[in-house]
Image: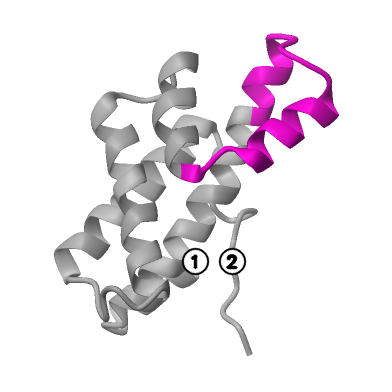
Amino acid sequence: MAAWEYFHEEDCRSAIVHAASAIERVMTKVVRKRLAEGAAATSSRIDKFIEETSNRLLCTVVFGQLGIGEESLRSGLADVFELRNRLVHGKQYQATREETQAALDGMEKLFDLGGIDIVNERMTRPG
């Protein structure tokens, strides 16, 4: 997975951006599946709800309501999105190795919780 590759190359900024993208993709799949299983709404309404809800609210409020993960994981995932936003929007230049390790650990926990095969969710490096 590209996030881990960047981490091992000491490019923590890129590792965070890629980890956040992977978390977002898996998180939306998990929420979509759980809401559909509960017949919460039509597929198109579920998709619209997910699209219009911030990632930080999806991983904290919606995950909490659906009983997905422990609070520490949910808040950790929200921290990843907050850090990614600071990096992308120029409020912070670089992530620390510790922040990046925590983001990657949270990403892997989410993959495990969602029953997602990390090989099939592979994000390839650009170029």
SS assignment at label 2: loop
Amino acid under label 1? Met
Q: Is residue 107 left or right of residue 125?
A: left
Tell whether position 68 is magenta. Answer: no
Q: Is residue 104 visible?
A: no
Q: Quadrant of residue 103?
A: bottom left
What residue lies at 83% left-to-right and 20% top-to-bottom?
Answer: 42
Front residue of 87 and 2 = 87
Q: Which residue is mark 1?
A: 1
Circle 1 residues within 10 Å: few <14, some 14–19, many ≥20: some
Q: Quadrant of residue 104?
A: bottom left
What residue lies at 28% left-to-right and 42% top-to-bottom?
Answer: 76
Q: CA distance from mark 2 to mark 1?
A: 6 Å
Amino acid under label 2? Met
Judging from the image, the colouring scheme is one colour
Quarter of the picture containing the C terminus is bottom right
Q: Are marks 2 and 1 in contact (CB under 8 Å)?
A: yes
**Hey, which residue is sitting farthest bottom in the picture?**
127
Front residue of 112 and 64 = 64
Q: Position of residue 38 (x, y in %)?
A: 68, 9
Q: Which residue is mark 2?
A: 123
